[in-house]
Amino acid sequence: MLPIDPSQISPEDIGEQQTTLEMDHEEAIEHVREVFTDAGFGVPVEFSPSEMLNEKIDAGRDPYYVLGACNPEVADRALDATDNKLGALMACNVVIWEEEPGLQRVYHVSIMRIARLIGMSVDDDAMEDIIADTGELVDDAFANL
């Protein structure tokens, strides 16, 4: 039994955002990286699960890419607000997958909102401010995609 009923969680509860881009996969990765960087994120981690799975187990996966975005100032505050536990969820991933050639899905959920939902926050006021700040940054990025 899960401690949280997933059917009771809305996309807003987890800060879900998504859009589609009409461009090839590599172009979409570059575009998303640039837009999130312009919005105040760094991208310290990135990888292609599809390449790894296709290589290791011949999965036959379509292009799928993860950009681990991070705003250092906010990340520092979030570590304090969660007694360092939020590091287990870092970075704030933005995922790009190919729905069909020339059409890419960009998807993100808020690790800050998820951390609050599962009780990681030891300082709810600080976490609420962090959620608001990261929400604005992500909103700005998605508005410019």
Image (cartoon, grey):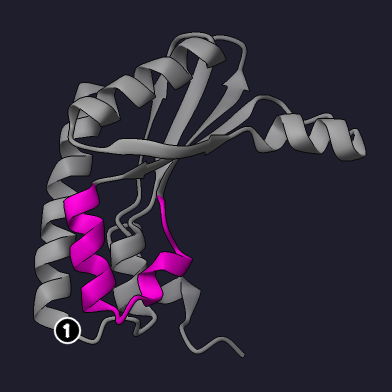
Q: Is residue 82 left or right of residue 98?
A: left
Foreground pick, 83 / 49: 83
Q: Position of residue 12 (x, y in %)?
A: 27, 59
Q: Is residue 33 left or right of residue 39?
A: right
**For the residue labelled by badge 1, is the local secondary structure a helix, a strand or a loop?**
loop
Q: Is residue 108 left or right of residue 122?
A: right
Magenta run includes residue 82: yes
- Quadrant where the N terminus lies? bottom right
Magenta run includes residue 130: no
Seen in the picture, residue 38 relative to 101 is either above or below; the reply is below
The residue lying at 29 percent from left, 64 percent from top is 112
Q: Position of residue 90 (x, y in %)?
A: 42, 58
- In magenta, the rendered stretch is 72-91
Q: Residues within 10 Å of mark 1 (few under 14, many from 20)?
A: some
Q: Position of residue 104 (x, y in %)?
A: 50, 22
Q: Position of residue 11 (x, y in %)?
A: 35, 57
**In the rendered picture of this protein, how many numbered marks are placed on residues?**
1
The residue lying at 36 percent from left, 16 percent from top is 31
Res. 59 visible in picture? no
Which residue was labeled with disc 1?
A: 123
The residue lying at 90 percent from left, 40 percent from top is 57
Quarter of the image for residue 2 reads bottom right
Quarter of the image for residue 81 reads bottom left
Res. 119 visible in picture? yes
Foreground pick, 103 / 132: 132
- Amino acid type shown at disc 1: Asp
The residue lying at 19 percent from left, 56 percent from top is 74
- Quadrant where the C terminus lies? top left
Quarter of the image for residue 10 reads bottom left
- Predominant secondary structure in magenta? helix
